[in-house]
Image: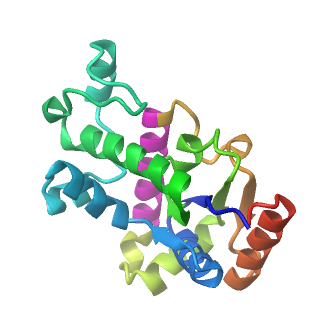
């Protein structure tokens, strides 16, 4: 058993990726981080919790300017962060926290480019959970209680926001199979079956 082990889950909206990640963490007795990362980042840099939540997984154009001006890097060196918008500051803090969590513990992390942040970590498995549009729209209505007339639009808008965030901060295409170890369709299998598949893969990789 590895002392350090992480599963990074990216997910389309309505696919159930977060629920799968939480159930997986519970089954393997791993720590679970999704919106919990916002609280950790907010506390670390005295950010307003509500503003941080509103800025989570959203990109801003200011980062390109900041990078060109050499204000900070994506490594462990962070400077002039007080001059950055909340979106960029939150991303950088979460980047640092994700690295530390993966290096010092056993956890499941949902979203926030964790798969690419941890791509050089041999004890990290990256998963992309997706499903067909109708399945995700119906789940948005049933699980998240989104009005039927708006569900399809919300699904598309949320996916677009996540894709833009991922592309902006990672330079890669969100959902591209080559960026993940496993891509699983949650409309084809029960969530428990998907969890079992991930565990089997982790055992084959001798990560667990």
- Please say whether residue 189 is one of the residues in the magenta stretch: no
Considering depth in this image, is 52 or 122 the residue closer to the camera? 122
Q: Is residue 112 visible?
A: no
Position of the C terminus, as image quadrant, is: bottom right
Residue name at image x 75 percent, y 56 percent:
182
Residue 24 x, y percent position in the rendering: 62, 77
Q: Quadrant of residue 89?
A: top left
- 157 up-or-down from 166: above or below: below
The dominant secondary structure in magenta is helix
- Residue 150 left/right relative to 2: left
- 173 up-or-down from 28: above or below: above
- Please say whether residue 160 is one of the residues in the magenta stretch: yes
Residue 90 x, y percent position in the rendering: 28, 46
- 104 up-or-down from 27: above or below: above
Residue 112 x, y percent position in the rendering: 45, 51
Q: Which colouring convention does the figure follow? A: rainbow
Residue 5 x, y percent position in the rendering: 63, 60
Highlighted magenta segment, given as a residue range = 152-169
């Amino acid at each position: 058993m590895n002392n350090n082990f992480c599963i990074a889950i990216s997910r389309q909206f309505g696919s159930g990726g977060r629920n799968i990640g939480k159930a997986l963490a519970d089954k393997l007795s791993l720590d679970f981080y999704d919106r919990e990362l916002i609280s950790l980042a907010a506390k670390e840099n005295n950010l307003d919790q509500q503003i941080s939540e509103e800025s989570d997984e959203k990109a801003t154009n200011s980062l390109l300017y900041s990078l060109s001006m050499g204000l900070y890097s994506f490594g462990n060196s962070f400077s002039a962060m007080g001059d950055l918008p909340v979106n960029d500051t939150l991303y950088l803090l979460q980047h640092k926290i994700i690295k530390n969590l993966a290096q010092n513990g056993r956890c499941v992390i949902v979203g926030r480019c964790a798969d690419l942040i941890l791509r050089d970590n041999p004890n990290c498995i990256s998963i992309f959970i997706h499903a067909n549009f109708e399945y995700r729209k119906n789940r948005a209505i049933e699980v998240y209680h989104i009005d039927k007339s708006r569900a399809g639009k919300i699904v598309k808008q949320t996916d677009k926001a996540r894709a833009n965030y991922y592309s902006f901060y990672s330079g890669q295409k969100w959902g591209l199979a080559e960026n993940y170890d496993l891509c699983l369709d949650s409309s084809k299998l029960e969530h428990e079956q998907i969890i079992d598949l991930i565990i089997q893969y982790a055992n084959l990789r001798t990560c667990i």
